[in-house]
Every structure is written in C-alpha cells, then in structure tokens.
Amino acid sequence: MDLVLLQNWLDNASFAALFVTMLVYWVGAAFPNLPAINALGTAGMAIANLCIATLLGARWLEAGYFPLSNLYESLFFLTWGITTIHLIAENSSRSRLVGVFTAPVAMGIAAFATLTLPSEMQVAEPLVPALKSNWLMMHVSVMMLSYSALMVGSLLAIAFLIVTRGKNIQLQGSSVGNGGYRTNGYRLHKAGELISQPATAENNGVVRLETNHNGKGNTAVLDLITTPESSTLINAETLSPQRLSLAETLDNISYRIIGLGFPLLTIGIIAGAVWANEAWGSYWSWDPKETWALITWLVFAAYLHARITRGWQGRRPAILAASGFVVVWICYLGVNLLGKGLHSYGWFF
C-alpha cells in the first residue's frame, strides 16, 4: 500500500476510534453499571494510540526524519501523548471517569489535524536548515510529551472541580502519594453504603459511618471528625462518600501526572536553550514561544510548590492546575497563530 494512502487511512481511523471512544466513555459515565462499556473505552483508546503510533512511524520512514516538523505531525504526536498518558492515568486510578475528559480533547485535536488543516500542511516537507539537527527529536519530543502530561493532569483537576461541585473539600496526604485520609471533617478509609453512628462525647466528636460492602460482611469505615474548623463544612456537605472517594482519586492522579509532566517540561526547555545557542548563538532571546514556555513552567512550578511546600490540597491547587490547561494551549498553539518569532516556521505564516 502507498504510504500516503496508508497515512490517510490511519489518521481517519484514529479520529473515528477516538470519536467512538468518547461516546463509549460518556455512555459509561451515564450508566456506570455497564462494566463492558467501560472496558470498550479503554480498548478504543489503545486502538487509537496504536493507529497514531503507526501513522507517525510511517511518516518517519517516508520523510527520513522524526515526524515533528509541522503542525499536522505535531498535533498527532500530541494526541498520541495524551492517549498514552490517559492509559497510564486510567490504569493507576482504576476510574473510567478519566476518559470522559481526555477522550473529547484527544478527539478534537485529531479532528482538527485530519479535517481542518489544508492538505498541503499535511504533506511531509523537507526540513528547513534550522531543524536539521539531532536536537529536533530531543527538544521537541520532550516538550510535546510534557504538554500531553500537563494537559491530562489539568483535565483531571477540572474533573475534580466538577465532581466536588466547586466545594472547598480539603484533602490531606495525597501530595506525597500516601493519601487515604482528609482533614476538615473527613477521614475516608473505604467507601460503601453508609450506616451512620452519631457523634457522642465518648468518641470525641467523631461521627463513625460503617458499611457492609457488597453484603459480604466486609466493613468499611468513614470517620467524620467534628472540630470547630470542620463542623460547618460537615453540616453543609452534601457529597456522598463515593463521590468524595472519586474526588480524592482524581486529585491524587492529577498531582502525579503533573509531577511527571513538569520535569519533562524542564528538560525540554533546557534542551531548547542549548539548541538555540547552537543555531542562533543565544540561549534565550525572549521569543514569544520561549516566553510562554517560561510562563507555563512558572504556573506548574507554583502548583507543585503549593502542594509540596505549602500543603495545599483540593480546590485551590485544582483551580491553579485548571488555569494551566489554558496556559499550555497558548504556549503550544496560541503564539504560533500569530506567525511571529523564531518558532513560527512549519506552522502558520
């Protein structure tokens, strides 16, 4: 089969797979008692990931260089990265809700690359002189993988805000990966159907809620600790323990994924500075792309600093991570729409 025809088939197949996967995840979220539907979502994301990997590999063989020289290749590499990070996050969280948020973004990017970009921008072109360097693979691929991880982490933070309905649910412990309890009124050990036990003087104001999980005699316990700081929160809280447990999972996985993306972003920026010095004689020239890469780095550095050093949990860092989703898109695509700067070749003019 001709490579061009194979690429056309693969990009359309990946878009179709992501579109169907998005619908599957949404149906699974609406009808959570259909486990087979949820398993189909994971399979669809894996199929799309494989199609995109094959597409990029075919272009690599055809053009003879790593496929990150124009917008079409970059968008599909970003989609491949998002689907890869999605599979990692979904496997870690054991929650299919991840795909409800990541699948539409991946599908939208693939649709833009496949259906919106003109055909001349989808053709592999010879590299411009500035890109004929081994740093192309090192710098650009690491930056794109960091964008993928940061986008997925930010999407999970947005999911956390939606699940908690914007309430100020403060979590404790997930920043060091050893979560399992929350302050400000909640200590969750395991979720299940609640059987409440009221607080008394003997139990020091602890409301103990016990469950019988699946009717098999396995008791799960949820302690609601009534302190002066948390009594108002407990009285106002309407979220179920299942929703709170899901929120804790999303918060923890979001933190871990952003913790993966931030070092990649740092390495990518350093590699870009070294490449810039070789190509243009300067490590940093305050190009629009460089400036927004620095802004992106500062936003997520602030997020990690707030969680690790300041001990922020829950809503406040989630809002910061959600704003990072917009910043990443401006850095990745927004500045290139202007067609200005040293990073504008191969994109829009």
Image: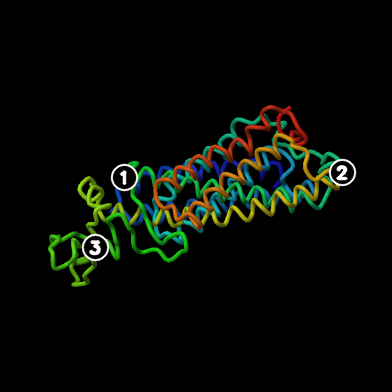
User: Where on the picture, by quarter, is residue 245?
Assistant: bottom left
- Above or below — where is 62 with respect to 116? below
Residue 307 location in percent, x, y?
48, 54
Which residue in the structure is indicated by mark 1?
30
Which comes sooner in the sequence, label 1 or label 3? 1
Q: Is residue 5 left or right of residue 164?
A: right
Identify which amino acid the numbered label 1 is placed on.
Answer: Ala
The answer to whether the residue labelled 1 contacts the one labelled 3, judged by CB atoms less than 8 Å apart, is no
Residue 2 location in percent, x, y?
72, 45
Identify which amino acid the numbered label 3 is placed on.
Answer: Asp
Which residue in the structure is indicated by mark 3?
223
Q: Is residue 33 left or right of residue 45?
A: left
Front: mark 1 or 3? 3
Residue 72 location in percent, x, y?
67, 38
Which residue in the structure is indicated by mark 2?
281
* Visible residue check, residue 209: no
SS label for mark 1: helix
Is residue 253 or residue 39 the one in the foreground? 253
Q: Tell me which residue sits at (72%, 31%) in the image.
A: 120
Outermost residue, bottom side: 217
- Above or below — where is 142 with respect to 211? above
* Visible residue check, residue 249: yes
Is residue 145 or residue 189 the one in the foreground? 189
Which comes sooner in the sequence, label 2 or label 3? 3
SS label for mark 3: strand
- Above or below — where is 164 with respect to 289? below
For label 3, count other residues whose C-alpha is less than 10 Å away and answer few (under 14), some (14-19) or many (20+): many
Distance CA(mark 2)–CA(mark 3): 61 Å
Identify which amino acid the numbered label 2 is placed on.
Answer: Gly
